[in-house]
Image: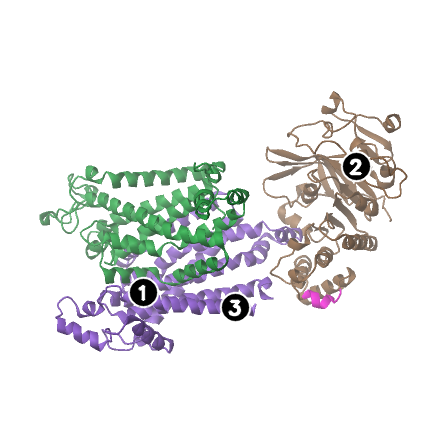
Amino acid sequence: MNGNLVLPGMWRRIKLPPLRHTLTLFGAAIVSLAVFVAIFAPLLAPHNPFTQNLGNRLIPPLWMGGQLSHLLGTDQLGRDYFSRLIFGTRISIIIGVSTVIASGLIGITLGLLGGFYGGRIDDAVMFLITCRLSIPIILVALTVVAMVGSSLTIVILTLGLLLWDRFAVVARTATMQVRNLDYVAAAEAAGASRVHVLLREILPNIANHLIVVATLEMALAIMLEASLSFLGLGVPPPLPSWGLMIAEAKDYMFFSPWVIMIPGIALFVLVLGINLLGDGLRDLLGADRAQ
Amino acid sequence: MNVSSAAPVLDIANLRIAFGMRAEPVRGLSLSIHRGETHCLVGESGCGKSVSALSVMNLLAKGATRSADHIRFHQQDLLKLSEREMARLRGDKIAMIFQEPMTSLNPAYTIGSQMAEVLERHRRAPRRQALEKAADLLARVGVTAPGMRLGQYPHQLSGGLRQRVMIAMALMCDPELLIADEPTTALDVTVQAQILRLLLELQQERGLALLMITHDLGVVARMANRVSVMYAGQVVESGPVQPLFAAPSHPYTRGLLACIPVPGNGQSAAPLGSIPGTVPRLAPGFTGCGFHDRCLHATPDCTGAIPTQSPSQGHDYLCRLTPGWTKEAA
Amino acid sequence: MWLFFLRRLLLAILACMTVMVISFTLTRLSGNLAASIAGPNASAADIAIITKNYGLDRPLPVQFLDWARHAAEGDLGRSYLYHVPVWSLIRQRLPITLTLGLIAILMALAVSIPLGILAAAREGTIIDRAIMLIALIGQAMPNFWLGLVLIIFLALDLQWFPISGVDTWHGYILPAIVLAFSAVPALMRLTRSGMIEALAADYIRTARAKGLSRSKVILKHALRNAAMPVVAITAVQLGYMLGGSVVIEAVFALPGVGYLAWDSITKNDFPVVQAIVLFLALLYIALTLLADLVNALLDPRLRR
């Protein structure tokens, strides 16, 4: 009401549960590490991830008899695996964050509108959500990429247009709960415009639920991109997407299993970390209700 | 009302209930009930009466611990029973009915099924026999068309009917002790009277020992042989109902009774009594009188140990003030 | 209740129609479909022939209505690649995908429900935390990677299962395990939270006051009430499995509907793609309607 963003819902309810705490911190640490690696990838990677060296193909990792210059060995085209892994982190983080922003914009808008206005508009929003839930998203994503061409941007846009449903559902439920509270009525009575009410009164107070959804959707986006790239219809080579790395390594996996183990473990650890963080945030912010 | 002078059916000695370290809702409750006797445990909400009732059958929620010198059902000390042994008594020799008939029955199963399972569990009765008994009991408690009701679901019945079903269900195995936790509070006034009358009849028929939890002194007047008045986790006064109502001795009891408007009483111009203050939240370990901060006669001694006074046979109260003080104060 | 179902049915039909539009639009995204079909080396003449033959020069709404009308009658068109009716292709592959999905969902339920109940009954204890940790791990595991890992260790090294294909029923086990892995976390969490809520209800106190044994209280009284959301999400998970099996079928080389879809996508066989997207969506809608029906049976209150 005076222009400052007030976040009462979020900070008032922080309580610290004991054991959960450690897992959440662990998750936060993983995510922070991943973001750090993603940002500073060029500085951290010992080699260029795209440089091929066919004389150095399939060198095993250091602990399996490899070389110091290639800590995690090389792939089938002689590219340093460690460097590819690092740059792959960048791709995963970019995909995760961008998709969440895109799907969040769509989903939160729809949820806010449906929850706030109710009636026909809400019916329409619910109908859209039902339709979205009916379609098989992997197939649709594959088709889009096949039709339009594969690139990082296309993957982000496609996933963003497909993964908004949970944002919409949670935003809608939370908006409906908050909508009838006193401070909303007060703002409306003071003559605030609808947009102002939505953005300044309602949105900050449902933000804690949305943050939890954002973390979970980010994990989902990263997994989906990996699946798409694995099937050859995601991020195009030679970009070092972890899913793509696994796909490329599939032909060699029987002889050199580490080529699929390493990116797979990286993927698993990142997604696990994000999920742990999301769960911890859910406990911390008291956002259990709007599920 | 044949009150047997034999050993009590239920004898609770010095019951204490704690919620971890945080609170002590019951700080020493003792009472005993004989066969055919109705004992009312009365007090405001928050005084610890419901939780005392639950603790008899060990139905407390997680995190609550009970302790007592003993909780004897006939000769058995219920405190010493394992969960398994206790489960054998529940629903069989000791039965309980609750305050909210709306939510106390499982919405997914029929009335008949829920009633029959008690007999099936405790007497290994075949379903048909159990359902027959259920129908008989439903008829006894005043439910019309009992056969049809057996096949109905809880949501199809009114609150009063549901409570009758709960009572019938509690009687399936002919219990000796019935614990009723505010059975009429959630019902309409007209239905309340019917349910209370039903309970009295059943008790006389079967010689039930009835422990009735209530906050309504009117219920006490109707039903009780003995009454225990509870405040802040302690029984502040107890005794046979007539002498206690005639000569309430604890300041809290006096305050309670003064709050009741009596129609036709000549003092209609006098203001209705009220007790200043609110129910306290006592710190665990407090051993004094819980009423001291609202009592007009309190002294610093009241935060220490309180003696038990006894104005007449069977009538006790916990106070520093000696019997007969009311005549001086009046 | 029947009114409720009628309304659901009408909405479902409306959703089907919307999905039809979506799946049709999907395949027209590349702009020039004829060029995509013809391939990179096609001449302008080839493209013109294809355009003529498949009626791709007609206005889009006309193409859509034509397809929709046929689809409503059960004719989903013909595959460009195999020149047979699409439906026959789907029907051929459907048993494999359905078998896989059913085995997977049964595995998932067999694991999730007991563990969810256990976690709820022991809420807050180490057992509960451990079970929730399992759920988290399952959620984070990339399914295609798990499939590959299982192939390496169980099929190759230990030779317990075939590496690919479904010549024997053994071939279903590994892919079913992987699919089940992704469904278990959601099912387990929901069972747990449903049970926790049910166990806190008043009627549970009544059941205990009647002297019923602990297992009876949990399994008979609480579970019935906790089951409803679980039924709903089982239908959803089954829908996901059937729609998302494309990755697993690719990893394990199973000739199911998912594999067919992927194959058709990469080869621009768009009638097949369109039809499969539509078919899977219809399946999902039917499953959720079925779940609603089962819930009405479970909760007498819904039946008025």
The circle drawn on residue B256 is 2
As rendered, which of C112 and A194 lies closer to the eye? A194
Which shade of the palette goes to chain B?
brown
Three-letter code for the amino acid on which mark 2 is drawn: Leu
Can you say whether A21 is above or below A139 in the image?
A: above
| Picture residue at 67% right of the left edge, 27% below the top | B286
Cα–Cα span, label 3 and label 1:
40 Å
Residue ranking furthest to the right: B266
The circle drawn on residue A109 is none
Which shade of the palette goes to chain C?
purple
The part of the image, by quadrant, that contains residue B289 is top right
- The percent position of residue B103, horizontal first and vertical second, equals 64, 54
Could one spot residue C142 in this view of the protein?
A: no
Q: Are marks 3 and 1 in contact (CB under 8 Å)?
A: no
Q: Earlier in the sequence, mark 3 or mark 1?
A: 3
Which shade of the palette goes to chain A?
green
Q: Which residue is mark 3?
A: C5
Horizontal side of C295 relative to A24 (left or right) equals: right
Q: Which residue is mark 1?
A: C171
